[in-house]
Amino acid sequence: MRWRAAASPLSPAPTMTTVIASTLVVGDGGMAKCAPVRSLLPKLRAMGTTRRISVIHVGRIGALAVALGIGSAVAVAQAASAQANTADAASEQTAATSGRAESRGGESRGAESRRPAGTRAAATSAARAAGGRQVAASRRQIGVAVSDRLPTWSGGGKARTPVAAPLAASVPSAPPTWKPGSILRVFVGNGTAENPNAGMLAGNGYSYAAYIGACTTGACNGGVGGLIGNGGDGFAGGHGGAAGLLGAGGAGGAATTAGGTGGKGGSGGLFFGPGGAGGTGGNAVAGKGGDGGDGGDAGALSFFGTGGVGGTGGTGPGGIGKSGSAGRSAGIGGRAVTDVPSANPGDRARGIAWPARIALDLLLDGGALLGLQSGYVAMFARDGQVVHASTAGYADIASRTPMELDTRFRIASMTKPVTAVAAMILIEKGLLGLDDPVARYIPAAADLRVATSQNAGPDGTIDSVPLDKPLTVRDLLTFSAGIGGGRDGASDLDRLWAERNIYTGSGPLEARVDRIFTAPLYEQPGTRWRYGWSADVLARVVEVAAGEPFGDFIADQILEPLGMGSTGFLTTGDSRDSLATMYTQNAAGRLVVVDQPGGDSLDWTPGGSGLVSTAGDYMRFALMLYNEGSYQGVQILKPETVALMTQAEVQSGVLEDENIEGLGWGLGMAVVVDGDATSTFDRTGDYWWSGFYGTTFFVSPSTGLVGVVLSQNQPGPYSPTPYAVYIAQGLAFLGL
């Protein structure tokens, strides 16, 4: 594939033969195999692309990512080799047995707590003194899990397992131990319980895990890191220590008193490093739970720095404490992370390896720079908690409006899983049956017939026969209803369905469904998977069974309970503020605005498309599915219902004209039945779906990974295939 040369920096580079030709190998597995494009066809078909390219060559390591990784590792190894920690092994053991609160994946272990959906804290600023140093920290509602830290050292030159390591790829040789009071300790060395701050040049601040040394009561603030080094973790509601130039901010301590406030995360390094996570608020025996601490900011000039996640509020009879706001990510290359609460308050995520996160950001930044898309928003969660989010490019190129985490996107066919969940809610309520005949809710379905030929006879009519069995709700959910999709085809039957396109003309959902039911079905219900308007027909079934308009039902039963406040159908009078501009490529390869994208200014509520949403909103929906039907204590579906939806009813042949190994279809979404057979990044048991405009989500129960990647590009004759969206998914998997 080639893209034409263009003068604009947002246009594709000449003779570019791949979207991004290299990925980063992390972990012990690496890239086990290449991914044939035929395995991506279902996702590309959902996005509306019809291009056929046999193979995408996914390389090993991008040169820039290698340089970043090696350079950082060398720098940190050199600095760390001079560090020392005078704490003895007995002190370490005492801390370990006194309930040390470790930080992993951006959350501190503490009392289990809950955060209400949709919490957004206003921007604040915080400053505190630690060892004579002032650390400024301004915050807004963004953050990321801190999965890695610089290595720390125990006394006697013995290496201690680091909590995590974003800046070092290997453990350096053991440092010398400076004698107490040595002048060298002023410049190089780790903080201790008695002197928590690290040396001025290099060293990690001390992490309190118990009352010891200089802190025997109250809140214990973590030590400040050196110019190269991490801030220490706080304890008992104490604040995390700040890093210097390079390093991660320390995590705020979880509250240890009833209704206490969690500590604030420390600021990340000025040039490199994430802010620390806020501490969890304390549970209350009486009254309201304590507030969670704010996440620490990334450095003001940071490259790839991220703000820390805010701590979750504690629970109590009087209510749930306020969640801490996420740390600001204002650096040059810093990345923002949403304040989407974890699926289960108190859970700790394992995170995604930092090289994979950097490679992912480089991929999306490169795609926007080359003009493959105007921009992207990507968000990934692990173990129910958001661990990475990034933005790239522009929501509107002309006004230079950047992509933000709250940018709204037309999600197109990602509406279909929402419609499927709506139907399953009614099934759980007993208002709808999985095997109910559709004619019970849509009388026109009783007169349906099935075409015996796709071409008309001499008299101009298409021969047809009656249904062998009634069309059922299950047939609609499994896309085996025989319902077409209005695509331009060569047959007379294709043209007949195109004339009755459910997305053209005027009228409510009821009239549109009645119109398409005047055409014969492609095949007998339940005999073949066919991508079409089944979800739109299902939406009509839902509103009849529920006794209210489809849009109102999903708002009441799904969107509002999950805190999806930016999600809904885009009607004529709705504001277009924060909505990403739709683009496509012209013959010169330049991005041009699509004046009236499909799905804009709706006077009806379809079930197969039409929703607009944000990455954070849709992540809440995906986390609900991952968490077996509940999110933040709100039960949308029963676990057994989610299990039923995500098992393959259709075992193979997801595309009617393709035999895609390993891929099937559940109730409203694609299901991977054999991850090895797909030759993609998918694992067996994963489920996902995509949208026409370059949007996708996936849930991987076996790995705990959930992802949402959004762009806004209408496919056309000159539009590149959106490989970057799926390579981003692959990079996230490689970072596990």
Image: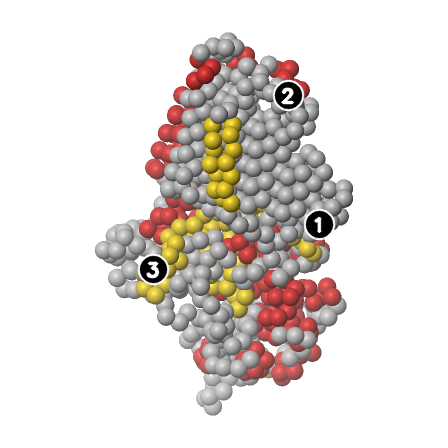
Instruction: Look at the picture and state if 482 lies above or below 258.
Output: below
> How is the rendered protein coloured?
secondary structure
Residue at 44 percent across and 22 percent down: it is 200
Closer to the camera in the image, 7 or 643: 7
Visible in this render: residue 26? Answer: no
Q: Position of residue 475 (x, y in %)?
A: 63, 69
Are there few (<14), some (14-19), or many (20+) residues within 10 Å of tag 3? few
Marks 3 and 1: in contact by CB < 8 Å? no
Where is the N terminus found, in terms of image quarters?
bottom left
SS for callout 3 = loop
Rendered image: mark on residue 399: 3
Q: Earlier in the sequence, mark 1 or mark 3?
A: 1
The residue pinned by badge 2 equals 212
Q: Earlier in the sequence, mark 2 or mark 3?
A: 2
In the rendered structure, the answer to whether residue 262 lies left or right of residue 489 reads right
When asked about the image quadrant of residue 596, the answer is bottom left
In the rendered structure, the answer to whether residue 589 lies left or right of residue 43 reads left
Closer to the camera in the image, 411 or 25: 411
Q: Position of residue 38 (x, y in %)?
A: 44, 55
The residue pinned by badge 1 equals 319
Which circle, 1 or 3, is nearer the viewer?
A: 1
Cα distance, mark 1 to mark 2?
33 Å
Cα distance, mark 1 to mark 3?
43 Å
Cα distance, mark 2 to mark 3?
55 Å
